Amino acid sequence: MDPASTRDVVVGEDGLARPRWAAVDPMMRGYYDSEWGMPVRGEQELYERISLEAFQAGLSWATILRKRPAFRKSFADFHPDTVAQFTEHDVERLMNDVGIVRNRRKIDATITNAKATIALRGDGGLEKFIWSFQPETSPAPRTFEEVPTTSPESVALSKALRKRGFAFVGPTTMFALMEAVGIIDTHLVDSHRRGSSGVWVTMPDLYTRLVKK
């Protein structure tokens, strides 16, 4: 393991190396090991991720993850056609729902984005649209300092979604989305999850695997 990255990676009792943010809390560890960075496809699945990333803005992801079951219940499992029909009565219901993040602008954006998701169906749909911004290369960070927070692709995706009527889809939020759904791989090189999505196998990954063998 690269000495420069040891402060950012923790080897657990199971012998697996994880970033510090996923090394202590069992919920975050489970999310990291089974979900984060794995390819997400499908309109409903991606609409949910966009929605949750918007709610996460200014908050910790752990907060959103703990509330995810309540979010799914309150937003009809993020079924775009259902959420697009939400009325002001639903907004008030959600503003009084203690199980979710009660932010009117974010709630309004989730409804707006459901309508925008439906509108994209005529042009191939949300999945095709989002994945079309996959870059030719992916970062290979060894430390947290090397992990970007935006990229040219996340900036372009943000602009394109806004042009299509989406809200709360800034470049940083879209970069976080791209990380979470496997469009890019920002797992630290020494992490046991590096390259596990099957989407990216970089030269540093191949080198690390050869060294470990």
Image (cartoon, rainbow, N blue to C red):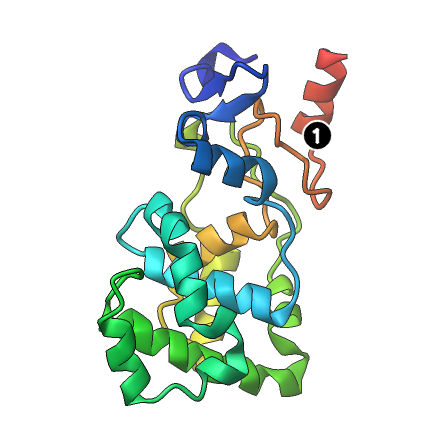
Splitting the image into 4 quarters, where does residue 20 fall? top left
Q: Is residue 158 above or below residue 185?
A: below
Instruction: Name the one closer to the observer, 72 or 118.
Output: 72
Image point 29% across, 73% down: which residue?
Answer: 94
Q: Quadrant of the N terminus?
A: top right
What secondary structure is marked by label 1?
Answer: helix
How many marks on residues? Answer: 1
Q: Quadrant of the C terminus?
A: top right
Q: Is residue 160 left or right of residue 182?
A: left
Q: Quadrant of residue 139?
A: top right
Vertical comparison of 163 with 25: above or below: below
Q: Residue at x 73, y 26 (%)?
A: 206
Which residue is more in the foreground, 104 or 170? Answer: 104
Q: Is residue 140 visible?
A: yes
Is 167 or 85 nearer to us in this picture?
A: 85
- Which of the 4 image quadrants contains residue 111? bottom left
| Residue 17 image position (x, y, % from top left) | 55, 20
Name the amino acid, label 1. Answer: Met
The residue under the point 65% across, 52% down is 39
Q: Nearer the viewer, residue 13 or 190?
A: 13
- Residue wearing tag 1: 203
Mark 1 surroundings within 10 Å by alpha-carbon count, few (fewer than 14), some (14 through 19), many (20 or more): few
> Where is residue 148 drawn, in percent x and y?
44, 42
Question: Left or right: 76 with respect to 185?
Answer: left
List x then y, in percent, for residue 202: 69, 34
Q: Is residue 156 visible?
A: no
Using residue 40 as the reference point, say whether residue 70 is left or right of it: left
Residue at image coords 68%, 28%: 205
